[in-house]
Image (tube, helix red, strand yellow):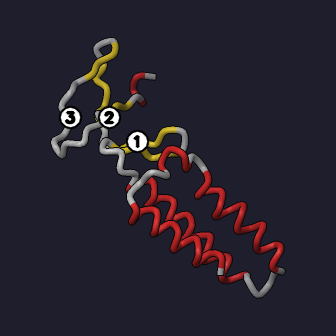
């Protein structure tokens, strides 16, 4: 439906895009970021919002793994890590993987924390 349709303009400039789009005289909402197929895309394509969401998911699962690490064997912990943490890193990384070095380093640091 047109009601749930959103648009965004991509630009390297800091000035916002002021385009008004309409379909059948219904205005299309202009947003700065949108979730598309599980990837958060923003209007500057810097991927900060998507990386922040990945880090939040990773933190949740790393905390759970820390609490149960003494209760389950190593091979089961590796399976849990691959299922709940590594899968979020691998999902669509060809799209967002060319993010800034600080974004990649923060994911790498959280990944190392999860491996311990």
- Residue under numbered circle 2: 8
Which residue sits at x=51%, y=74%?
Answer: 109
Q: Is residue 78 left or right of residue 39?
A: right
Q: Is residue 59 left or right of residue 21?
A: right
Front residue of this view, candidates 84 and 27: 84
- Of labels 2 and 3, earlier in sequence is 2
Residue 106 at x, y = what percent? 46, 69
Element marked by disc 1: strand
Residue 11 position (above or below residue 86):
above
Which residue sits at x=65%, y=76%?
Answer: 115
Residue 96 position (above or below residue 52):
above
Residue 110 at x, y = what percent? 53, 72
Q: Are marks 1 and 3 in contact (CB under 8 Å)?
A: no
Badge 2: few (under 14), some or many (20 or more) residues near its Cα, within 10 Å? Answer: many
Q: Are marks 2 and 3 in contact (CB under 8 Å)?
A: yes
Q: Find residue 64 and report its image quarter.
A: bottom right
Q: Is residue 41 left or right of residue 21?
A: right
- Of labels 2 and 1, earlier in sequence is 2
- Work out how far the residue at label 2 is from the one at label 3, CA to CA, in angstroms: 8 Å
Q: Residue furthest top?
A: 24
Residue 77 at x, y = what percent? 76, 74
- Residue under numbered circle 3: 17
Residue 6 at x, y = what percent? 37, 32
- Work out how far the residue at label 2 is from the one at label 1, CA to CA, in angstroms: 8 Å
Which residue sits at x=20%, y=34%?
Answer: 17
Q: How many marks?
A: 3
Q: Are marks 2 and 1 in contact (CB under 8 Å)?
A: yes
- Residue under numbered circle 1: 34
Front residue of this view, candidates 68 and 1: 68
Q: Find residue 74 and report its image quarter.
A: bottom right
């Amino acid at each position: 439906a047109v009601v749930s349709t959103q648009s965004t303009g991509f630009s390297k400039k800091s000035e916002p895009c002021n385009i008004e789009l309409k379909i059948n005289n219904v205005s299309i909402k202009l947003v700065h970021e949108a979730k598309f197929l599980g990837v958060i895309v923003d209007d500057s394509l810097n991927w900060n919002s998507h990386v922040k969401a990945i880090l939040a998911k990773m933190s949740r699962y790393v905390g759970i793994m820390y609490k149960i690490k003494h209760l389950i064997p190593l091979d089961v912990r590796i399976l849990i890590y691959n299922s709940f943490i590594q899968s979020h890193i691998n999902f669509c990384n060809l799209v967002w993987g060319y993010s800034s070095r600080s974004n990649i380093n923060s994911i790498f640091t959280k990944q190392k924390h999860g491996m311990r």
